Image (cartoon, coloured by chain):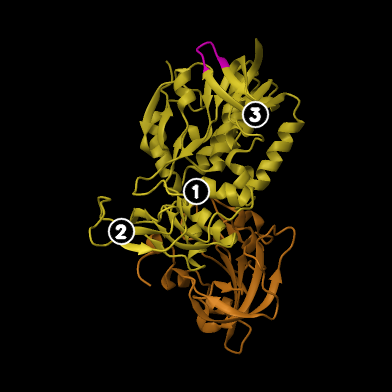
Chain colours: A orange, B yellow
Amino acid sequence: MTGTLESTGIASREMFEKLLPSPERRARGPYIVMECYEEIPCNPCSTSCPFHAVHMDNINDLPQCDIDKCTGCGSCVGRCPGLACFVIDETVGDGKVKITFPYEMVPLPAVGDQVDALGRDGEVVGKAEIVRVLSTEKLDHTSIITMLVDKELLYDARNIRCE
Amino acid sequence: MKFSDVVIIGGGPAGMSAALAAAEAGVRVTMMDRFSEPGGQLVKQTHRFFGSEHERAGTRGIEIVEILRKQIEENPLIEVKKNTDVLGIYSDRVITFEEDHVYGRMTAGKIIIATGASEKMLQFENNDLPGVYGAGAVQTLMNVYGIQPGQRVLMIGAGNIGLIVSYQLLQAGAQVAAIVEAAPRIGGYKVHASKVRRFGVPIYTKTTIKAALGDHRVTGAVLADMDDKFQIIPGTEREIEVDTICIAVGLAPLSELLVHSGAEMHYVPQLGGFVPVRDEYLETTAPGVYVAGDVSCIEEATAAMLEGSIAGVSAAIASGMNRPELIAKREEFVEQLAILRSGAAGKKIRDGLKLIARREQN
């Protein structure tokens, strides 16, 4: 992958890793990663957070998450208009991680499905097992999916292909 | 002749917000729209909007339009003229129009022009082949009528419209073969770009379409690289197989009626084209004529709604409703809009507005 986010639409591994919390926090439970790299006037992540963990002084700021208040609940995942919030859970063990992401396509996968995990460029990066599918009226067609993937795919896996 | 305190021309996000703001301030409003239902471009915006809670952030355009329509319907001070084309505005604020193909006239105390914008076209060989669409038409077919316009689409333009419509094409089950962008950078929000990239849609910057291929309908396109001066680099041409070409290269304000009204106009590229000089409450140099939405400057629907609110409440205040709470409310709207435009994404708009701001008398 060459080029920058501005020319490719793909955030680099370095940009992503800067968003990761401390190793201690990562070992403690699920946490949010807000892949919001560009200042745009928008704040539903902050207003939707039930734990008041996401701060913005000005609506144009990048969201700042107090990761010790964040429980990884995923409220913002379904509210972010940019579909840029992801919950990562590194505590599952067995060389796996859970990645929770927003999904607005049909058909929806079902829990237990084995699907292709797609990378940031839509290429297949590995296999994923669907472990949770949340699609409520309140979510209004932005479903929240959790997939189980190899922990090496922490940065890469951001989507799935449902046949 | 029939009279209305405030006549609003255009029933999109700006016009609807203007109607509500003016009527809530207590004046009688007539809102004219050329389509069978008001709503403008909101009726096809299936994505969640950015912005803050004030501007209904996180809500989809198609839901915002339902909320606004209901409020308008329930407000006894608002009359909506549907299927109505405005033909002319005269200096004494007489408006002539065709309503359901019948000619009519009325006078207005104040006029708010909220006519929106039209899509820009791109010059390339064969650009009149069936299968070449504007992005607005593609959105209308898919999101209003449930018709998928093609199987394999080439998107021209990586601004927010190009990116969002590409995503909606994927949702409709179409393939997006590529998004091409003449500039070296993606113009739209990067979160929108990342969304389509995750589904395998490539974005080619510094690339343009040279020709559409096909005899009776689109069967492909010729792409070519562009240099820093936006000239095609010879020898870089290559073909791509698609059945649909969707053009999303920007919008231009639909400002003819402003010209009619006698408002002073200037060409401001940052705002999208010919736009009127206006004060901070959106009154143009034509007395009693206000402007709001994309016809004022090409921007997001959230900004259009705020501009509508400012123009609506201003028209009411100027009609005699100059109550302190309305003046305070107007300042709130002005401030909300300033905050919305205060970041990096709003720089182009701020630069453009500086060029067009009306110098206050005295």
Contact between marks 2 and 1 (CB within 8 A): the answer is no
Q: Chain of mark 1?
A: B
Q: Secondary structure at mark 3?
A: helix
Residue at image mark 1: B135
* Badge 1 amino acid: Ala
- Report x, y in % for residue A149: 58, 81
Residue A58 visible? The answer is no
Q: What residue is rendered at 28% in x and 56% in y?
A: B226
Which residues make up the magenta segment? Answer: B89-95
Q: Is residue A116 toward the left or the right of residue B256 in the image?
A: right
* Badge 2 amino acid: Ala
Most distant residue in the bottom direction: A94
- Neighbour class for label 3 at 10 Å: few (<14), some, many (≥20)? many
- Report x, y in % for residue A113: 67, 80
Q: Give the mark count.
A: 3
* Badge 3 amino acid: Ala
Whether B362 is drawn above or below A12: the answer is above
